[in-house]
Amino acid sequence: MALIAPIGKQVLVLMVAFSSLPWTAHAQASTFGVYMTANSRKQCAQKLENFDKKKICLVAQPILKLEDVSHITAMRLDLGNQPYFSLVVTEQGLTKLKGVAIAFPNQQVAVVVDNIVIGFLTDLDRLKSTSIKMTSNNASQVNLQMVHEKLKTVFPLRN
């Protein structure tokens, strides 16, 4: 699944692979973070699985935490009838993401919910807005809806 965030005429892509949705069994409070992937064993502070059960090495501290995201929007349809929602980061969150883009060009950045890597942010150097449009070109609307429902347990919903 590719989650895409248009930025003017440029695009920020969040790649997500779905196989099962393990978060549905979680009863505890949701957790969220955006982490840089580790480039070496020495940097690998934690290994988390993605939906395909592949282990992803991440650094210890997140770039973005809960307080760096303002809200998510309701699900909508774009002009091509593709479903989407927006993840809206704070100005501080946007500054942090831009800082990573400058300091670590081409660095993969993982989005984590409930200790599961749900995707990767790329093209951080192209971010222009705090609103990141999330859509899917090659996964079902049901999967995107499930991600949206999960994020609604973490972030407030606004229009």
Image (cartoon, grey):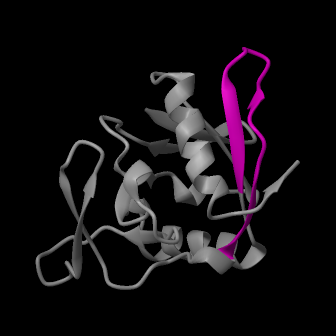
> In x, y percent, where is residue 37?
31, 67
* Residue 118 shows in this picture: no
Quadrant of the drawing holding the N terminus: top left
The single residue placed furthest to the right in the displayed view is 159
| Relative side of 50 to 92, left or right | left
Magenta residues span 68-87
* Residue 24 shows in this picture: yes
| Relative side of 63 to 9, left or right | left
Residue at the image point whose x is 61% and y is 46% from the top:
149
> In x, y percent, where is residue 79?
79, 18
| Relative side of 36 to 68, left or right | left
Check the image and report above or below for 49 versus 69.
above
Q: Quadrant of residue 109?
A: bottom left
Q: Quadrant of residue 80?
A: top right
The single residue placed furthest to the top in the displayed view is 80
Q: Residue 69 colored magenta?
A: yes
> In x, y percent, where is residue 91?
77, 74
The kind of secondary structure the magenta stretch mainly shows is: strand
| Relative side of 20 to 153, left or right | left
